Amino acid sequence: MEQKTCLVVDDSRVVRKVARKILEELGFACSEAEDGLKAMESCANSMPDAILLDWNMPVMSGIEFLRRLRKMTHGTTPKVVFCTTENDIAHIQEALAAGADEYIMKPFDNDIIQTKFMQVGLL
Amino acid sequence: MKVEDFDMFCSLLKQRSGLVLTRDKAYLLESRLMPVARRNNMADLDALALAVRTKRDEKLLEQITEAMTTNETSFMRDGRPFDLFKTVVLPKMLEARAAKRHIRIWSAASSTGQEAYSLAMLMEEEKHKLAGWRIEIVGTDLSAEVVERARLGVYTQFEVQRGLPVQMLVKYFTQQGDKWAISPDLKRNINFRVFNLLGDLSVLGQFDIVFCRNVLIYFDQPTKAQVLAGIARQMPKDGYLFLGGAETVLGITEKFRPVESQRGLYYPA
């Protein structure tokens, strides 16, 4: 079976590193982007199976990226899991309306990432 | 801990909750009972053991039993049993109870309530099929403390992220500061109560579906057989029993049989 791919989008290098480690242990081949615009470029180049997405980032926010992604060719394919400190219901609803598949409220651990990726059918 | 104290605590726990502890679990006993000792102004476990022997204080005995019971749980724990419930068990029950339009479900070690609320959410998702039906969910646990938490239905951010799809979080919870409270509508059909599985199960009445997951693993063989026989008496022949992934009825009781190719699901024999 072909290895699933995940793009980790977060402006924090530490968060990217931790999330990447967890996702690689779950069998994903990971790439990284530090803001929404870089993530757009990455997706235009190669659409991943999953995207773990921060909300607040410089240049382009996670929610703006998601809205643009869903309009791209094949942009509805990736499962998008938000992973953010924005932990109020209004943000969650906004993310779902923009096309997010799941939502992780930071802080996260291996268990939470694993169950959320299972819920969207990637594990 | 002195060997005679360890044996005394083990015998107490076995008698009151069915929990079987082996010598290699002495560390667990010590780590869980030290807070009980401190809460009761005792310096160490020697003092706690002495109090148990001399006072027979019911409150203290309850605290000891509760401290040793495991409350590990999560929403939609293990996923598959809930899929089975939705795709196999519920459709069969809707057919079998079409005349009565009443289903009773028992979450037999409900801990802080996540299993019972998960079932209530699944039922709500299927409500288009349940117009005019009465669905009753009973959640029981040995620990008064966790039953109170279950009744309250308020969970931490960490708890609502373990197993619960975010769409259900948004639909069935309201945010209260950094906590999440289950909707009063879902609570309405659930009755949580303190109950010991070693007690007289007939007081709970009959159940069409029983979830008794990850409980039997803590019991010895005769206690497992006793509990399963008790559950069987409370179920009609067309009922369903869910056990945990590491549990089985095989070699323990003839009262239940596995449902073919549906791991973890059993029916009364």
Image (cartoon, coloured by chain):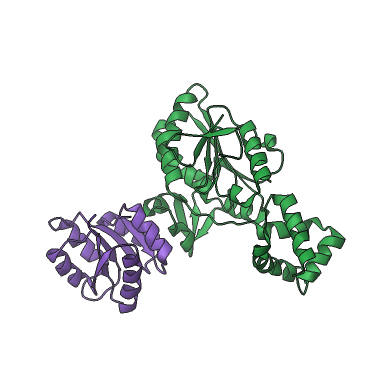
Chain colours: A purple, B green
Q: On screen, A75 above or below A17?
A: above
Is A109 above or below relative to B117? below
In the foreground, B170 or B4: B4
Residue plotted at (28% across, 76% down): A11
Query: Is residue B3 or residue B265 the one in the foreground?
Result: B3
Looking at this view, name the residue that lies furthest to the bottom: A13
Q: Position of residue B194 (x, y in %)?
A: 67, 47
> In the picture, which quadrant includes the N terminus of chain A?
bottom left
Q: Can residue B124 be seen in this view?
A: no
Where does residue B41 sit, x and y in percent of width and height? Answer: 77, 71
Q: Classify B61 as above or below B238.
A: below
Indicate left or right for A23 with B202 as reference: left
The residue positioned farthest toward the right in the image shown: B54
- Residue at screen point 70% across, 66% down: B33
User: Which residue is outermost to the top?
Assistant: B99
Q: How many labels does the image show?
A: 0
The spot of residue B119 in percent (x, y) is 48, 43
| Relative to A62, B149 lies left or right | right
Q: Is residue B108 visible?
A: yes
Task: Please name the residue shown 30% across and 72% down the image.
Answer: A56
Q: Which of B183 and B240 is in front in this view?
A: B240
For the residue pair B16 and B177, the one nearer the viewer reads as: B16
- The quarter of the rendered structure image containing the C terminus of chain A is bottom left
- Residue at 65% x, 40% y is B225
Where residue B2 appears, as percent x and y from the top left, is 77, 69
Q: Residue furthest front?
A: B251
Q: In which quarter of the image is residue A70?
A: bottom left
Lateral position of residue A100 relative to residue B123, left or right = left
Query: Image quadrant of residue A114?
Result: bottom left
